[in-house]
Image (cartoon, rainbow, N blue to C red):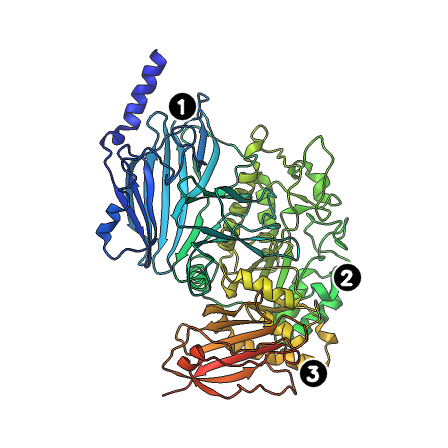
């Protein structure tokens, strides 16, 4: 009896604010949208509205009227498990006494302004019986109509509690039907779209791969309301979990025909123990909503990403020449010197040395050995990286380098020296992915090791100007020697360890450009991109395939973040390959020294053109005009913020007889009152210009009538530049 009286006394103090709970309305507003939360008579927090912003703010108080006397709380703003809700929970807890029920009641909320455009609303909830506190965070980027949502869970109990589920967000939408666009894939097949109508029950998008988490599908998705949204019409929500590990997104059409979206870290094999007074903060779930189609939603997301998320989103990017497809692992110092001079001759900003430069006892001559031994290979590079950096600087070219610091080969000195650092089951046969295993970044000693790899490269080579960070393996046989009896925390603590390393790197090297790579697009998310300037969409650099891959990425990520290289993959002409790579951050991965003189001259001219038009591509608004999935041609337009300059890319994506654009391409985003001069650019030497070259049109004409890029078998890639004329 005394034990229960003691608990009652503690809870009376802990939950004193709940006694005064009243019905409260909390509107969370962006420039065009509203998310409205309210409390019912019992103090439970519900979602009463999500959609377009209402003209009169007083109306938000009426949106919850239909719930205030209802027993059903399927619209819970953060659904707890084990009490009165029978819906899929956002949070589930095992308390210190073994009880698994949770009931969250409203305590307070506040809104603070962080910047002119950014505000943060926090809502505190508590359990009336157990000393658990949950705070919901809504970070609003008003002008961009973007919201980041996450949660914080605090254990005020006297013993340990276990978080069995801990989502970042719990949204509720209402419509007549819901259409999900999600993505699947594999190596070299990233971003394969599927769109289906959601039916009653739960649809789950998740990954359990641990590291290369997006290999079979990313966390980005769209949900259209009532019908599949088009580029310029329809209501659509874009969402993504900002987390570089296992994620889970549940989409449930409930018995009331509402769509409940619960998103965050995947709780698979991951119950997380919280000690007394310990706090657990989830990653953010980022989303935007548009009532005017997918194009508007993506432009909002791009502006947000450039201004607030990716590193140096309004800055510069370096064009580069990579050695990988010229040499693979088979190079030496003389080979690289020649390629550096090739980079200078080509006209790029930087030479990137890829895989194969390290390891001595176990030299990195193929992908079976060397990972973990980050010393320059003395046979390949007798004078070290420093000599190559100096060589590049003398040629007026910057120097970058490839690393894969999270990984280890069994044939490496590190593997034999620190077997306790390797993720593997102690009593099971090792299973390799690309002949390698993963290092245990849950271990602080491993975090220090990985950080020191990068730090040492920059200390020894102060002129190092770029880093390509790769991650080729998934996690098999998950087990951490360091975590001992808390193995269920491994998947979470691994990613936290990774972010801790990246925090340290960015604190010391805040401006160094870094590419996010994972055997292609195996790790593309806004959690990771807060540390990187760009991502590698796919190892598939066939330009025809890249049209489709980059098209889908363009819904969620801005062009400035997409690293696109010209390679010898595919059968398209050099011009086609360069045009596709221009729709982002341009790079080359070809043996420049073997190019015919005409091809080399064309590449040099293309780079000069690219340096002129890249501000429009990187910072402009994107308009997807002709869908490659539905037509013979793909057309995509970039328009600068002043609407004075635009670049239109057009590609033939169907090689059947007489394929091509049959109708004019109508442009978007221009100023209807201004005159635009059209110029066909990036023409291969000797190729005639099309009929639109030199023409003058009003913006109104171009958007209502359009122009003819004349894309067909003999003109498979056409780039048109538009500029306003004075007057």
Asked if the residues shown at circle 2 and circle 3 are in contact, with their CB atoms under 8 angstroms apart, the answer is: no
* Of marks 1 and 2, the one in the foreground: 1
Check disc 2 and report the residue beneath it.
330
Check disc 1 and report the residue beneath it.
158
Mark 1 element type = loop
Q: Is residue 592 left or right of residue 661?
A: right
Check disc 3 and report the residue beneath it.
598
Of all residues, the one furthest to the top in this rendering is 1
Q: Quadrant of the C terminus?
A: bottom left
Which of pointers 1 and 3 lies earlier in the amino acid sequence? Answer: 1
* Of marks 2 and 3, the one in the foreground: 3
Of residues 142 and 358, the one drawn nearer to the viewer in this rendering: 142
Residue 707 rendering spot, x and y as whole percentages: 50, 81
* Of marks 1 and 3, the one in the foreground: 3
Q: Is residue 284 left or right of residue 20?
A: right
CA gap, disc 1 and disc 3: 76 Å
CA gap, disc 1 and disc 2: 60 Å
Mark 3 element type = helix
Q: Quadrant of the N terminus?
A: top left
> What is the crowding at mark 2: few (fewer than 14 residues within 10 Å), some, or many (at least 20)?
some
Mark 2 element type = loop
Which residue sits at x=53%, y=43%? 204
Of residues 504 and 183, the one drawn nearer to the viewer in this rendering: 183
Asked if the residues shown at circle 1 and circle 3 are in contact, with their CB atoms under 8 angstroms apart, the answer is: no
Q: Which of the 4 image quadrants contains residue 576?
A: bottom right
Which residue sits at x=69%, y=65%? 323
The reply to whether residue 349 is visible in this rendering is: no
Which of pointers 2 and 3 lies earlier in the amino acid sequence? Answer: 2
């Amino acid at each position: 009896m005394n034990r229960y009286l003691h608990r009652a006394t503690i809870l009376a103090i802990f939950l004193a604010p709940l006694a005064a709970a009243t019905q409260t309305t909390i509107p969370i507003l962006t420039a065009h949208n509203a998310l409205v939360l309210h409390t019912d008579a019992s103090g439970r927090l519900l979602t009463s509205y999500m959609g377009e912003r209402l003209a009169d703010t007083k109306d938000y108080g009426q949106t919850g009227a239909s719930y205030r006397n209802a027993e059903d709380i399927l619209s819970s703003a953060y659904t707890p498990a084990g009490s009165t809700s029978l819906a899929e929970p956002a949070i589930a807890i095992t308390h210190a006494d073994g009880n698994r029920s949770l009931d969250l009641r409203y305590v307070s909320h506040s809104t603070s302004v962080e910047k002119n455009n950014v505000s943060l609303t926090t809502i505190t909830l508590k359990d009336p019986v157990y000393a658990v506190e949950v705070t919901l965070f809504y970070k609003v980027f008003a002008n961009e109509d973007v919201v980041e949502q996450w949660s914080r869970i605090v254990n005020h109990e006297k013993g340990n509690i276990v978080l069995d589920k801990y989502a970042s967000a719990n949204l509720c939408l209402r419509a007549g039907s819901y259409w999900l666009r999600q993505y699947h894939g594999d190596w070299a097949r990233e971003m394969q779209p599927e769109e289906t109508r959601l039916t009653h029950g739960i649809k789950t998008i998740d990954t359990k791969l641990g590291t290369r988490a997006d290999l079979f599908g990313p966390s980005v998705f769209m949900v259209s309301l009532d019908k599949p949204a088009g580029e310029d019409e329809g209501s659509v929500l874009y969402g993504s979990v900002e987390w570089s590990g296992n994620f889970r997104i549940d989409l449930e059409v409930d018995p009331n025909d509402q769509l409940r979206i619960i998103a965050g870290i995947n709780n698979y094999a991951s119950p997380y123990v919280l000690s007394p007074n310990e706090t657990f903060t989830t990653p953010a779930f980022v989303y935007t909503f548009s009532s005017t189609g997918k194009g508007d939603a993506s432009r909002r997301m791009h502006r947000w990403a450039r201004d607030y998320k990716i590193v140096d989103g309004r800055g510069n990017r370096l064009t580069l020449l990579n050695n990988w497809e010229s040499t693979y692992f088979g190079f030496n110092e003389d080979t690289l010197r020649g390629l550096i001079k090739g980079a200078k001759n080509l006209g790029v900003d930087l030479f990137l040395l890829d895989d194969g430069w390290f390891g001595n006892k176990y030299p990195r001559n193929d992908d079976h050995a060397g990972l973990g031994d980050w010393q320059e290979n003395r046979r390949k590079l007798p004078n070290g990286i420093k000599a190559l950096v100096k060589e590049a600087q003398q040629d007026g070219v910057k120097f970058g380098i490839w690393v894969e610091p999270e990984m280890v080969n069994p044939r490496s000195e590190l593997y034999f020296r620190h077997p306790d650092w390797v993720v593997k089951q102690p009593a099971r046969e090792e299973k390799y992915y690309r002949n390698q295993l993963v290092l245990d970044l849950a271990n602080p000693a491993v975090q220090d090791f990985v950080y020191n790899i990068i730090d040492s490269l920059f200390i020894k080579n102060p002129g190092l100007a770029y880093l390509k960070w790769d991650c080729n393996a998934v996690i098999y046989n998950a087990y951490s020697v360091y975590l001992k009896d808390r193995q269920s925390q491994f998947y979470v603590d691994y990613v936290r360890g990774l972010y801790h390393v990246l925090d340290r790197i960015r604190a010391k090297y805040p401006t160094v450009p870094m590419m996010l790579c994972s055997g292609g697009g195996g790790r593309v998310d806004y959690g990771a991109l807060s540390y990187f300037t760009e991502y590698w969409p796919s190892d598939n650099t066939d330009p025809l395939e890249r049209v489709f891959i980059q098209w889908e990425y363009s819904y969620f990520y801005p062009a400035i973040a997409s690293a696109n290289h010209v390679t010898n993959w595919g059968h398209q002409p050099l011009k086609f390959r360069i045009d596709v790579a221009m729709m982002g951050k341009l790079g080359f991965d070809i043996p420049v020294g073997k190019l015919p003189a005409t091809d080399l001259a064309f590449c040099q001219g293309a780079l000069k053109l690219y340096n002129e038009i890249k501000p429009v591509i990187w910072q402009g608004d994107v308009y997807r005009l002709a869908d490659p999935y539905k037509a013979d041609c793909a057309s995509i337009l970039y328009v600068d913020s002043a609407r004075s300059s635009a670049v239109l890319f057009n590609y033939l994506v169907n090689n059947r007889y007489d394929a091509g654009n049959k109708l004019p391409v109508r442009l978007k985003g221009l100023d209807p009152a201004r005159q635009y001069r059209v110029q066909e650019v990036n023409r291969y030497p000797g190729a005639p210009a099309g009929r639109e070259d030199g023409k003058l049109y009003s913006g109104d004409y171009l958007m209502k009538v359009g122009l003819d890029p004349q894309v067909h078998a003999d003109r498979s890639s056409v780039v048109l530049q538009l500029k306003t004329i004075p007057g």
